[in-house]
Image: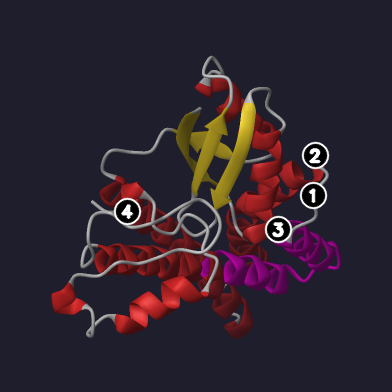
């Protein structure tokens, strides 16, 4: 039995994680696949050690997502990607707002403000529509498909500002969600470093947390929390850096 770990990008909800699990489970030689949406990782148990990692990555790609081996300095890489994404979202929102403001105050010709709004709409809606198309090709209905339908419907009746607002709110919400998930994952990793290195963690099932005597009382709430819920790979070895 061989276990392979991959970092999965492009997931926006728990249903995405289930879709990736299904795609990985269909690869010949895969005994079991467990995908964690929060940590953006996939753990694959292979019954055939000869199964190539490339076939696993290709299976994830066919499902509409991307996968790669875990980065060595994942936190720094994630921070850089998050800052870049935030700059793009902020720029799109600023362009949309300025275009709307100029049009509402008649400071520029209507055609100029409309072009600005449409450019902001295209910048904001493009990644959403791209993910929606991938989801439809994979025969999957998710939030990106619904938002893409709303954006297209609003644009078709000339409500470009409303369509841009929908796309901007979706992108901004994704950035806030990503920030919250990263903070939660790192906080949990910090809690795990309080504990003994031998945490009883598995991909599925109840988890048992063994604490040092010196911190048993101070962290009894953590022990109760971990033992109370069927976490899925929250305490992976990769988090105990």
Name the mark on residue 137.
Answer: 2
Q: Who is closer to the viewer here, 150 or 79?
A: 79
Residue for badge 1: 140
- Residue at image point 71% right, 68% down: 163
Q: Report if residue 171 is visible in the image.
A: yes
Front one among 73 and 21? 21
> Is 113 located above or below residue 145 in the figure?
below
Residue for badge 3: 144
Q: Residues in magenta?
A: 143-172
- Look at the numbered discs 3 and 2 and tell me whether their residues touch, using CB distance below 8 Å: no
Nearest to N terminus: mark 2 or mark 4: 2
Alpha carbon distance from label 2 to label 1: 7 Å
132 in relation to 161, above or below: above
| Mark 2 residue crowding within 10 angstroms, few (<14) / some (14–19) / many (20+) | few
Kind of element beneath mark 4: helix
| Residue at x 52% of width, y 43% of height | 42
Q: For mark 1, give the secondary structure.
A: loop
Nearest to viewer (mark 4 / mark 1):
4
User: In terms of depth relative to the viewer, which is nearer, 158 or 4?
Assistant: 4
Q: At 34% from the left edge and 38% from the top edge, which residue is drawn? A: 71
111 drawn magenta? no
| Location of residue 110 in the rendering, given as x and y in whole percent from the top left corner | 67, 70
Classify mark 2: helix, strand or loop. Answer: helix
Does 167 sit left or right of 38 as displayed?
right
Residue under label 4, please give it: 239
Q: Nearer the viewer, mark 3 or mark 4?
A: 4
Occupied quadrant, residue 30: top right
Residue, far left? 214
């Amino acid at each position: 039995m061989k276990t392979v770990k991959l970092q999965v990008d492009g997931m926006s909800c728990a249903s995405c994680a289930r879709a990736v699990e299904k795609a990985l489970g269909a690869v010949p030689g895969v005994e079991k696949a467990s995908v964690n949406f929060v940590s953006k990782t996939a753990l694959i148990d292979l019954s055939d050690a000869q199964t190539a990692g490339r076939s696993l990555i290709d299976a994830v790609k066919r499902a509409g997502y991307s996968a790669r081996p875990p980065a060595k300095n994942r936190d720094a890489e994630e921070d850089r990607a998050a800052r870049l994404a935030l700059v793009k979202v902020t720029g799109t929102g600023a362009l949309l707002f300025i275009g709307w403001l100029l049009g509402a105050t008649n400071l520029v010709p209507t055609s100029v403000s409309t072009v600005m709004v449409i450019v902001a709409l295209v910048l904001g809606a493009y990644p959403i529509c791209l993910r929606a198309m991938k989801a439809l090709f994979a025969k999957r209905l998710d939030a990106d498909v619904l938002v893409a339908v709303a954006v297209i419907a609003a644009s078709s009746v000339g409500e470009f500002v409303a369509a841009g607002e929908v796309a901007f709110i979706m992108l901004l919400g994704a950035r806030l969600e990503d920030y919250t998930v990263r903070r939660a994952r790192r906080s949990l990793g910090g809690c795990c470093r309080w504990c003994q290195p031998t945490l009883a963690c598995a991909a599925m099932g109840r988890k048992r947390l063994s604490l040092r005597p010196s911190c048993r009382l101070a962290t009894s709430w953590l022990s109760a929390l971990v033992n109370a819920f069927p976490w899925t790979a929250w305490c992976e070895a990769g988090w105990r850096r």
